[in-house]
């Protein structure tokens, strides 16, 4: 019997299989998947649109991949939104409209997030979104740029945001960084 466990919440998967307190401890072989190559993803998107009698230019596909951070769920959601516009020749303006539409649809939920967080947590979340990736969240430069208070309160807010799965720490690189979990929320906060 073969099982494949996958998900975008890497810390949960690691906890299930790497914690001695869990029943699946050391029972699997881990395989880390990297992001899809941008060039291959671009060609895939263009091919899928073409097979359905739609044309999308390189500028549009590049923007889609950049805006969704090459994350499959968000890329597919945006492409689906564009596809449902029923336009045969898709230009960058159509992509912008689809992005705005997605953010508008989710705005109510995003405002609810605001109500669930303290002002310190919300300000930190916005700052991380604006930066995209934050390597030193308690560093003087970052804290000062966004008026986040003192490093110890940033540390507490960051821990709370991680616990609420609003941000995550990517640690596969030589130096880790923090990023907002939800790409659409991140794009909305950037505005």
Image (cartoon, rainbow, N blue to C red):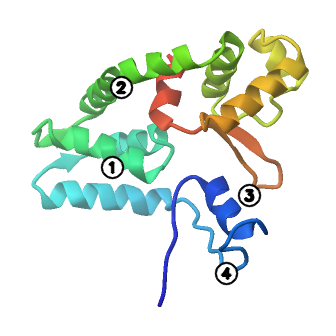
N-terminal label among 3 and 1: 1
| CA separation in Å, label 3 and label 1 | 25 Å
Image vertical order of residue 151 relative to residue 28, above or below: above
Between residue 119 and residue 191, name the one nearer to us: 119
Between residue 178 and residue 164, name the one nearer to us: 164
Residue at image coords 10%, 54%: 53
Residue at image coords 25%, 61%: 47
CB within 8 Å, label 1 to label 2: no
Pinpoint residue 182: horizontal percent, then vertical percent.
Answer: 51, 37
Say which residue label 2 marks: 106
Say which residue label 3 marks: 172
CB within 8 Å, label 3 to label 2: no
Image vertical order of residue 181 relative to residue 113, above or below: below
Which of label 3 and label 2 is nearer to you? Answer: 2
Say which residue label 1 marks: 76
Q: Check disc 3: other Cα within 10 Å, few if <14, some if 14-19, many if 20+.
A: few
Q: State the SS at label 4.
A: loop
Give the label on residue 27, or none: 4
Q: Check disc 1: other Cα within 10 Å, few if <14, some if 14-19, many if 20+.
A: some
| CA separation in Å, label 1 and label 4 | 32 Å
| CA separation in Å, label 4 and label 2 | 39 Å
Q: State the SS at label 2.
A: helix
Which of label 4 and label 2 is nearer to you? Answer: 4
Q: Check disc 2: other Cα within 10 Å, few if <14, some if 14-19, many if 20+.
A: few
| CA separation in Å, label 1 and label 2 | 16 Å
The answer to whether residue 57 shows anywhere in this view is no
| CA separation in Å, label 3 and label 2 | 30 Å
N-terminal label among 3 and 2: 2
Residue at image coords 62%, 20%: 126
Q: How many discs mark residues in the rendered view?
A: 4
């Amino acid at each position: 019997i073969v099982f494949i466990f996958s998900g975008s919440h890497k810390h949960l998967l690691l906890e299930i299989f790497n914690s001695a307190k869990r029943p699946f401890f050391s029972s699997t072989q881990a395989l880390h998947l990297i992001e899809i190559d941008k060039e291959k993803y671009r060609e895939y998107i263009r091919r899928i649109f073409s097979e359905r009698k739609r044309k999308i230019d390189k500028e549009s596909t590049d923007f889609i991949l950049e805006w969704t951070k090459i994350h499959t769920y968000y890329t597919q959601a945006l492409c689906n939104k564009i596809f449902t516009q029923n336009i045969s020749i898709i230009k960058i303006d159509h992509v912008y409209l689809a992005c705005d539409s997605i953010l508008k649809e989710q705005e109510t939920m995003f405002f609810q997030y605001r109500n669930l967080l303290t002002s310190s947590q919300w300000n930190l979340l916005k700052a991380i979104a604006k930066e995209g990736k934050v390597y030193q969240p308690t560093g003087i430069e970052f804290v000062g740029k966004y008026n986040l208070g003192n490093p110890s309160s940033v540390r507490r807010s960051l821990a709370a945001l991680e616990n609420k799965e609003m941000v995550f720490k990517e640690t596969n690189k030589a130096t880790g960084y923090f990023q907002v979990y939800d790409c659409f929320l991140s794009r909305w906060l950037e505005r």
